[in-house]
Image (cartoon, helix red, strand yellow):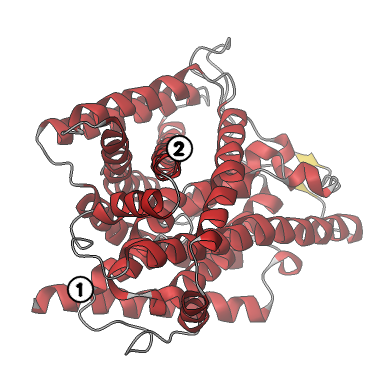
Amino acid sequence: MSIKQFPAAPKFRRLLGPSFIILALGLGSGEVILWPYLVANHGLGLAWGAVVGITFQFFINMEIERYALVKGESVFVGIAKFFKSAPLWFIASTFIGFGLPGIIAASAQVFANVLGLISFKWLAIFLLLLIGFILTIGKTIYSLMEKLTRAVILIGVPMIFVLAVTLSSSESWAALGSGIIGRGEGYWFLAPGMAIATFMAAFAYSGAGGNLNLTQSIYVKEKGYGMGKYSQKIAGLFARRGHQEVKLAGEDFKVDADSTKKFKEWWRAINLEHLLVFWLIGSLSMLLLMFLAYNTTYGVPGNASGINFVLTEGQAIGTMLNPFIGLLFLVIVGVMLFQTQLGIMDSTSRIMAENAAILKLKTEKDNKVDLSKIYYIFVWSQICFGIILFLLNIYEPKTLIVLGALINAFAMLIHVILVTILNRRSLDKVFRPKPWRQVIIYFIILFFTIFSGVVVWDQLIR
């Protein structure tokens, strides 16, 4: 590694960006689908799970950011230094976990309902191709994703807030308050008869989930946090560039009083950025979407069938307020789901491209590789995989989302362990997490281990 100077932290507003993307990655899975689905069928007593789940992910994400901030490289590069087979694991687990096109299927079903279409299979295929087109023409992919995700969040979340408050009652507010502490209607914490696998899936998707959390280290590089200032960016497929020399490894710096001070300034700033954008807006979004589902669909027959509760929400809003508003709600939900699938496609392709590049650079004498081209190979591979599943009539949204979430819950357990080992082995003591943060991370590992075992046992005995 060459020696560079640790950059000074900029003004806070210039830090905004990565947390919007990682937040938007969860809006179409846990926030829009799984948690509201559970509430529509079991009430608001499960609200605590969403808050705990996204709190866990806040601490998970910050440990991922910690490494990228100090090293100027992704956690994939760091993990591969002590776990040689890690790139293969990350490619396989990412493709399997997120290749299942449940979210875009949900988006297509919502849009099909708005358009009056009976089948949504061909619409889902069209939306997948549209995602490929959008990602392919972008000149700088990070800039494109940041603008799209910020726009969707700043438009969609306020509308959901207004609808949730307008359709609420004092009783429903009381139910929400009770649910946050785990008290439901006739139960504490876990509703009787609830599918544990679906709850675990929702918990794992309280935020991003699975290997998607690890892309935070890539986005930190792209945004130029800390030593990421010196890293390379992924260009669009049609951007003018040559067969570039790729440097995945970060830069080194002298550990002294100045660099330590700058790190602490960065650390305070990015914690605040992630707390306000990811945790606060994410928590409010999930609770409001659950609250809206409760006020419009709780107890309505047919909620347990797929994502029918979303369509029922739109009908209920139209009946209570105005048909146009109900239709607008469904359009917003469809757009949020589409944008989530777009973000996931981008993030998973980044994960697999970087890990493929790590493997390629290990086996070749020079370090020239077209990272952008590898990225687009994975983008279109996922699109083709999704289209094949749709053509085989495998496209029920909720089934695909829950299956993918369970796979990603296990993948998340693995990467939390790996990142914990990485930070302990690779970072100077002054940059490592404080003891209280270590305790939280160890508790998260224990929680996911136990809960994963419970889900497996529950599925086996059934």
Circle nearer the N terminus (1, 2): 2
The one nearer the camera, 378 or 173, is 173
Badge 1 local density, few (<14 within 10 Å), some, or many (20+)? few
Label 2 element class: helix
Residue 3 visible to the viewer: yes
Query: Considering only vertical position in the picture, is 83 above or below 131?
Result: below
Q: Residue at x 49, y 54 (%)?
A: 213
Asked if one can make out residue 422 in the rendered structure from this viewpoint, the answer is no
**In the depicted view, which residue is nearer to us: 396 or 266?**
396
Label 1, label 2: how far apart the Cα atoms are = 31 Å
Q: Amino acid at mark 1?
A: Val
Q: Where does label 1 land, which residue?
A: 456
- In this rendering, is residue 207 above or below 388? below
Quadrant for the C terminus, please. Answer: bottom left
Residue ID for mark 2: 339
Three-letter amino acid code at the position of disc 2: Gln
At 21% from the left edge and 31% from the top edge, which residue is drawn? 117
Left or right of 332: which side holds 166? Answer: right
Judge the density around disc 2: few (<14), some (14-19), many (≥20) Cα neighbours within 10 Å.
Answer: many
Residue 83 rendering spot, x and y as whole percentages: 43, 55
